[in-house]
Amino acid sequence: METVGTRGDARERAGDPAGQGAPGAAGPVIAGAGPVAGPGEQATVRLRDGDPEEPARYAPEWLRLREGADAAARAQELLDPLRIRLANLPGRSGGLVVHDLGCGTGSMGRWLAPRLDGAQHWILHDRDPYLLHFAAVASPRAAADGSRVTVETRRGDVARLTPDALAGASLVTASALLDVLTREEIEALADAGTGAGCPALLTLSVAGRVELTPQDPLDAEIAEAFNAHQRRAGLLGPDAVTVACEAFAERGATVRVHASPWRLGAAEAALTEQWLRGWVGAAVEQRPELGDRAEAYLNARLAACAAGTLRVTVHHTDLLALPRPRGAAT
């Protein structure tokens, strides 16, 4: 769930089917991503064209709230192998061309562009024109070595990429995307990336594990229900990284993975509050019989969060796929 709940929600119902919302929440929830936007707040992108049943993924307010935690969590350890591959790409002298899939407010570019050397041209993909505008305006202007960074935006369906769409790409990136895709969509992404011969850095996919301190007897039950909610309608949820690793490896790519957990304490109370509402709300939507117990649980957790005594670790995984460069011997 970008744990856009930790991420996760495409094709999951944005609100309670009964219209009751999450326990203790002011309105309906996106699974793992806190309440949906309020009045005057525009929600974000749908992944698939022509799917009226699919809710918007994330409210811009949620994306802004989680950006700091995302930046702290992303696996720095994957950057050195990525830099080595990028330095050896054919045609690198002309600069990097980076495709950011489901860019949201552009947090991936703000994190990654200043960590890579050389001129960069970022192509930002999203379905929401408001988010694309925000991402473009707030994009970084300089690389790590001071080289120029430029951007363009493309509205479109990031779940149906083709190798042609990535022609000339040096790198494909995404955050919190894999776990809201189906197996077929991840295979299409692997086809596109390996077909174009460009690396893929896919960060912050939910791992299906959450640790709360102090512990509560209901923690495991809520987590299990949330994970089941993420797997609805054929979405992969916590299984996405395993499927993606297999898909890229089967197409000849070298795949590396690294943990990228959110570690939320008193300083992240606002984020933790919204995450809790979405996490518990999705669990109750999946298992309505949790109802009263989940409401009491959420209220107690929110009180601990407000008091600064709650600590939460939301586990994610980052993936780096390094396909054979185009034209390389098989």
Image (spheres, rainbow, N blue to C red):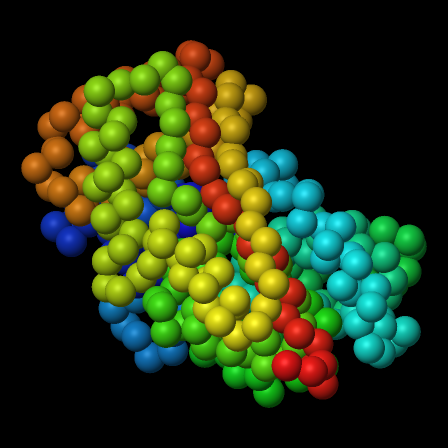
The residue depicted at 91 percent of the width and 53 percent of the height is 145
Q: Quadrant of the C terminus?
A: bottom right
Residue 294, percent across and down?
19, 29
Residue 307, percent across and down?
42, 12
- Is 257 located above or below residue 260 in the figure? below
- Is 253 located above or below residue 65 in the figure? below
Is residue 157 in sight in this rendering? no
**How many numbered marks does the figure carry?**
0
The residue depicted at 45 percent of the width and 64 percent of the height is 246
Could you tell whether 4 is left or right of 13 in the image? Answer: right
Could you tell whether 137 is left or right of 220 in the image? Answer: right
Residue 216, percent across and down?
27, 18
Is residue 32 in sight in this rendering? yes
- Nearest the viewer among 328 and 277 is 328
- Is 185 located above or below residue 4 in the figure? below
Quadrant hosting residue 254: bottom right
- Is 64 located above or below residue 328 in the figure? above
Could you tell whether 104 is left or right of 25 in the image? Answer: right
The residue depicted at 47 percent of the width and 33 percent of the height is 271
Furthest toward the front, the residue is 330
Residue 286, percent across and down?
17, 47
Quadrant hosting residue 306: top left
Could you tell whether 167 is left or right of 216 in the image? Answer: right
Quadrant hosting residue 90: bottom right
The residue depicted at 15 percent of the width and 53 percent of the height is 17
